Image: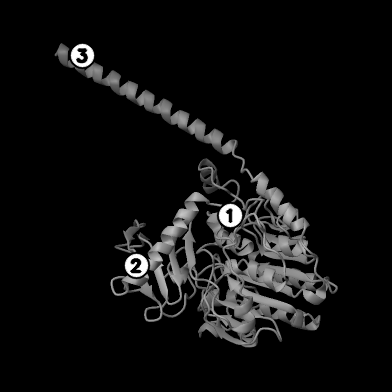
Amino acid sequence: MLRAERIWGGLLRLLGFVVGAAFVVCLGLLLLGTARVLLYAQEDDVEHLAAKRAYLAAMPELSQQHAPNLVLILFDDLGYGDLGTTGSRSIATPEIDRLAREGLRLTNYSSPAPNCTPSRAAMLTGRYAPHTSLTLIVFPDDSPLTWTAKLMDAPIRLPAEEITLADVLGAAGYRTFMAGKWHLGNNHPSRPIDMGFEHWLGVLYSNDMQPLALWRDEEVIETAPVDQSRLTEKYTQAAIEFLEQTKGEPFFLYVAHTFPHIPLFPSAAHAGESAGGVYGDVVEDLDRSVGRILEALDRLELADDTIVFVTSDNGPWFQGSSGANIRGRKNSTFRGGQRVPAIVRWPNRISGGVSDAMAMGIDLLPTMLELLDLPQPTDRDLDGRSLAAVLLEDAPSPHAALYAYAAGDLFALQGGRWRYRLRKGVELGSIGGLPFLPLVDRGPWLFDLELDPDESYDVSTRHPEVFARFAALAETQLALDESNPRRWR
């Protein structure tokens, strides 16, 4: 009995020691993590920030005669099939449909990423999101997800050394204005007025994040929670007021709508009208907004000198249509997560019709540089390619391949009729109401989009030479990303 008591006592002391040591270790890790979060400071690249400033300072200033205006209208989570011009029978979009008839519809256009922040970072810089380093979605400052990013020492804003389309056009003499959702950083030096926009009215992040306040430049003009049913109206009115104040100067207007990202808030005046339900109500509000901006361009006699480009930051989320026979939705690197509507109009310069040339949001900056005969920066690679010949001459795509990244990881690439998917996790789908299921690694796969647009059948064994070519392209891209992740020169 005494021996048993000694053994038992020894075990209890050992257990106490283990528990105490574990407590000390956990407490230490907690304190270390807390200190890491509290002391976090995102560092900008001093050398390339200086190169950015020198590049912009040397930018030749353009006159109105040689400088087409640019209106970029970006929807949030609008699906490829959510417009009348792309096949919707539930949602009426007469204004965007008219724009499509008058301009060029790009049917093989992709957003640069399948979710908000990295897609916008890539579109405005002409560089894939991993090359800007901003690969994760930005959350409010007090969000646990922001703390997690800081703990991982991950960027939480677009680095100041990145060059945006607004930076370039502003340096070339354009007036620049943004209305809508920014979502590239909540703090300086990465807010809209830090990154090339003279003025801004909008929100810092997605409408499902709180506290959601309405900003004008540096001032909150409507405290959280904002009346979201009026956001589309407010963005539209601010955009029109900007157009009325340009006074013959070249301009860049960026309207980045909050919707149809959820939660959905249709305008009071038109709620309940759409056959597409509340989602349809919201999209029809957006269509009316486009119509009002087009009407303002006509009224102010600006339309003939203005490029209007309408698109979405990624595919649809819980509602919305990815389009007929298209696999995937928002957050997915199957095509439905990134194939989005794209319409561009420039009267008397771009012929109307349809182009199936492969294109992506990263092409916008290089396209404007070529149209304006402006130099590219020399200290960094642009991943995008100019679409000038595609738009003006119906030329084929300038891309041999386009790459699909998510959260900084390369998932797939597309070239012509072929789409190659690396061995990556694929969703199992819903089984028995389980709240979550892990991804299962599958692939690599090769899809023939001409015969199989919904990426259903792997044909890698039928086309081994094509499969090998795309596998080699993927390996080359991965090697470059590892050796030079920011693609500095």
Q: Quadrant of residue 478?
A: bottom left
Q: Which residue is mark 2?
A: 445
- Amino acid carrying label 2: it is Trp
Q: Is residue 5 left or right of residue 425?
A: left
Residue neighbourhood size for the residue with mark 3, other residues' Cα within 10 Å, grouped as few (<14), some (14–19), many (≥20): few
Q: Is residue 276 among what the camera can see?
A: yes
**Residue 257 coordinates in the image, percent (x, y):** 63, 68
How many tags in the picture?
3
User: Given contact means CB atoms under 8 Å apart, are the residues at marks 3 and 1 in contact?
Assistant: no
Residue neighbourhood size for the residue with mark 1, other residues' Cα within 10 Å, grouped as few (<14), some (14–19), many (≥20): many
Whole-number angstrom distance, CA of label 2 to CA of label 1: 28 Å
User: Given contact means CB atoms under 8 Å apart, are the residues at marks 2 and 3 in contact?
Assistant: no
Q: Foreground: 405 or 224? A: 405
Q: Which mark is residue 225?
A: none
Placement of 108 over or under 180, stated as above or below: below
Whole-number angstrom distance, CA of label 2 to CA of label 3: 63 Å
Q: Foreground: 373 or 459? A: 373
Q: Secondary structure at mark 3?
A: helix
- Residue lying farthest left? 1
- Amino acid carrying label 3: it is Arg
Give the label, 2 or 3, closer to the camera. Answer: 2
Which numbered disc flags the more N-terminal residue, 3 or 1? 3
Q: Which residue is mark 3?
A: 6
Q: Which residue is mark 1?
A: 132
Give the label, 3 or 1, closer to the camera. Answer: 1
Which numbered disc flags the more N-terminal residue, 2 or 1? 1
